[in-house]
Image (cartoon, rainbow, N blue to C red):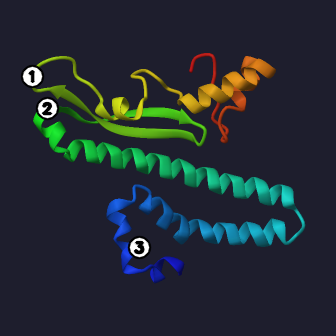
Amino acid sequence: PLYKVLSDETKNAKENCPMYNSIIEFIENDTTKIEKITKEFLLAGNTLRFEENLMEAMVELGRKIYQECLEKVEQSIKESEFRKQKYYVEHKADKRTLLTIFGNIEIERAYYKPKCGGKSVYLLDQYVGIESHDKVSLAVKTRSLEEAVETSYRKGGESACMTKDIVSKQT
């Protein structure tokens, strides 16, 4: 397989590339899926089904990369000298779900308490610009509003992300 012929330089990317695992997993598993949909749909003249299935695979890759990037940022925060000097880890692994244009992403992050007193925070949220109670990413909100201006709120919520996850009135 392709991943076995990677150079030593590329193998070192595992430590430096926040999406390394997602890309390797895609090469190992999803290239076979793409070969299958190519034979099943594209070579059978069904470009509609081919494009739908290919888009689904690409969106899933995007979701995995996004999630892995957030995990790497959280890991960097947790291991940083700044954090160790300024914050205690109050909770190790609080979970949160965020609806993105790639679908729902589950984020696991630590809750930090300042050593000098003050309000505890999720440093990951602050660092990447996610508001504390947001359940929907800025990209999804933007897409929803753009669509809602043209049609309706319901239609905007349905077309905000590339998966079947939708923005509802409660979200």
Residue labelled with disc 2: 86
Residue 41, position as x, y percentages in the image: 82, 65
Q: Quadrant of the C terminus?
A: top right
CA gap between label 3 and label 1 equals: 42 Å
Disc 1 is placed on an element classified as: loop
Q: Which mark is residue 3?
A: none
Amino acid type, residue under disc 3 in the picture: Thr
Which of the 4 image quadrants contains residue 37?
bottom right
Q: Residues within 10 Å of mark 1 (few under 14, many from 20)?
A: few
Residue drawn 34% across the image and 49% down it: 72
> Do the residues under discs 2 and 1 have CB atoms within 8 angstroms?
yes
Disc 2 is placed on an element classified as: helix
Q: Is residue 120 left or right of residue 144?
A: left
Q: Which mark is residue 116?
A: 1
Q: Is residue 87 left or right of residue 134?
A: left
In primary-sequence order, the first of circles 2 and 1 is 2
14 up-or-down from 131: above or below = below
Residue 17, position as x, y percentages in the image: 39, 59
Residue labelled with disc 3: 10
Q: Is residue 159 left or right of residue 138?
A: right
Amino acid type, residue under disc 1 in the picture: Cys
